[in-house]
Image: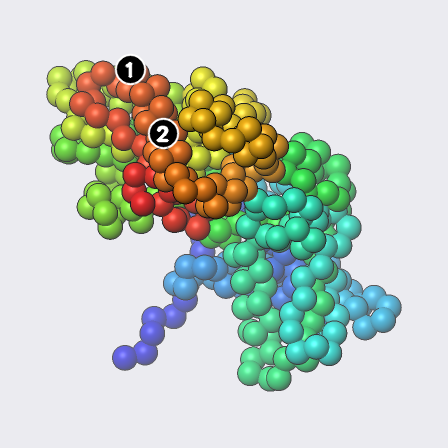
């Protein structure tokens, strides 16, 4: 039986919260790469290109603003970033790719003007590399393969940039993360989900009511995608029992308590699953973990290490870490790393529990960026 044909992803279909989705910087950069390669290798100028998404059932049609040959065998293509209804700092920015044959037989990623370079450990990309995340890199590799269509790969330099990206980056976390020179090229699905508006908070309440509607023994909160696999595979929760709460931890707890009170029932366990970079912010009394409303979590996790009696130089190293994912890497060398993360889980759960008195138990499980369990789940 032949595989079903891929379908175009329809951005005109609204997200469940009634808001418009958009294109990630990763999708835009990939579209620019594909348009530039098509002119470079085939002599064809395209006004839109098909971008393959991580979901193999779909592709995304992306408009191309401009494609032109430059000196030295370089082709440049430009794509406008579209963030939908998400308050995205890069919305409307011009993402570009300058593509040339390098003769090495491999694809090489380069930070052009306006795209940052990683300078510190703790991110998904090592220091010295352009701030282009793994999924966008994979999408661009697919674009190269698709344009080659089975022909030998001579190797290409993909220089990815953003017009005025150095200024735009100042409104992001990049300076704090040690990413210098511009924005990051991001995305895990290729699609921007409008998650950070007040309307999303209202939709979270709906999702929580649906999750609790059949009086389950447990539900789970996840700030993002990390922890979903654990919820499904280990906790055996139904899809509707797992609620992605984004940054809105406090109001999500309040919505849960209100719903349980209205039902005049109790919840056996409220699981909270995710990365400590978000969840550990609660140790500082933060209930909205958006970067505009909270600092980073290295301080509170360093304080836990100090209180647990870890060496002063290790505590200092944690406090000065670039990211909490960097703390995860640092702690891997420690014999009691699991106990450390379990203590953070316990403390966060203890802070959450008073906001949901109708839940018999609040349990936190922490995972690294690649989904590896850190504390009790390990």
Q: Nearer the viewer, residue 222 or 55?
A: 222
Q: Position of residue 246 (x, y in %)?
A: 42, 33
Write down the residue under mark 2.
Answer: 343
Q: Nearer the viewer, residue 298 or 133?
A: 298
| Above or below, 209 relative to 63 | above
Residue 247 seen in the current view = no
> Which quarter of the rendered picture does the N terminus lie within?
bottom left
> Which quarter of the rendered picture does the C terminus lie within?
top left
Q: Position of residue 109 (x, y in %)?
A: 67, 62
| Above or below, 256 relative to 80 | above
Residue 316 seen in the current view = yes
Q: Position of residue 342 (x, y in %)?
A: 34, 33
| Above or below, 60 relative to 38 | above
Quadrant in the rendering for residue 96: bottom right
Q: Earlier in the sequence, mark 1 or mark 2?
A: 2
User: In what element is the residue under mark 2?
Assistant: helix
User: In what element is the residue under mark 1?
Assistant: helix
At horizontal 55% and vertical 83% (from top left) the residue drawn is 150
Write down the residue under mark 1.
Answer: 354
Question: Disc 1 to disc 2, how far (Cα)?
Answer: 18 Å
How many residues crowd around disc 2 within 10 Å: few (fewer than 14), some, or many (20 or more)?
Answer: some
């Amino acid at each position: 039986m032949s595989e079903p044909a891929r379908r175009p992803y329809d951005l005109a279909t609204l997200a469940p919260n009634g808001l418009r989705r958009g294109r990630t910087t990763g999708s835009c950069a990939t579209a620019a790469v594909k348009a530039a390669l098509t002119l470079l290798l085939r002599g064809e100028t395209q006004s839109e290109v098909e971008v393959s998404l991580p979901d193999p059932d779909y592709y995304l049609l992306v408009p191309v603003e401009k494609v032109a040959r430059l000196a030295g065998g370089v082709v440049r293509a430009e794509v406008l970033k579209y963030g939908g209804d998400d308050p995205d700092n890069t919305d409307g920015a011009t993402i570009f790719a300058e593509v040339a044959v390098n003769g090495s037989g491999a694809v090489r990623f380069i930070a052009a003007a306006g795209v940052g370079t990683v300078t510190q450990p703790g991110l998904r990309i090592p220091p010295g590399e352009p701030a282009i995340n793994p999924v966008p890199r994979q999408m661009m590799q697919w674009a190269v393969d698709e344009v080659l269509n089975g022909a030998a790969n001579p190797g290409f330099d993909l220089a990815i940039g953003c017009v005025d990206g150095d200024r735009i980056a100042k409104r992001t976390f990049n300076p704090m993360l040690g990413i210098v020179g511009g924005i990051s090229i991001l995305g895990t699905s290729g699609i921007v989900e409008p998650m950070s508006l007040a309307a999303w908070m209202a939709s979270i309440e709906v999702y929580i009511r649906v999750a609790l509607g059949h009086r389950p023994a447990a539900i789970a909160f996840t700030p993002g995608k990390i922890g979903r696999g654990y919820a499904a595979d280990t906790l055996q929760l139904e899809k509707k029992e797992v609620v992605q709460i984004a940054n809105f931890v406090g109001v999500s707890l309040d919505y849960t308590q209100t719903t349980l009170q209205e039902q005049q029932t109790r919840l056996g366990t409220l699981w909270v699953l995710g990365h400590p970079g978000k969840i550990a912010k609660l140790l500082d009394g933060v209930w909205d973990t958006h970067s505009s409303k909270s600092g980073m979590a290295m301080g509170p996790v360093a304080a836990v290490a100090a209180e647990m009696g870890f060496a002063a130089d290790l505590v200092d190293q944690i406090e000065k870490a670039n990211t909490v994912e960097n703390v995860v890497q640092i702690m891997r060398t420690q014999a009691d790393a699991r106990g450390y993360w379990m203590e953070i889980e316990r403390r966060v759960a203890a802070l959450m529990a008073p906001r949901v008195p109708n839940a018999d138990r609040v349990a936190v499980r922490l995972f690294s960026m690649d989904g590896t369990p850190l504390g009790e789940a390990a």
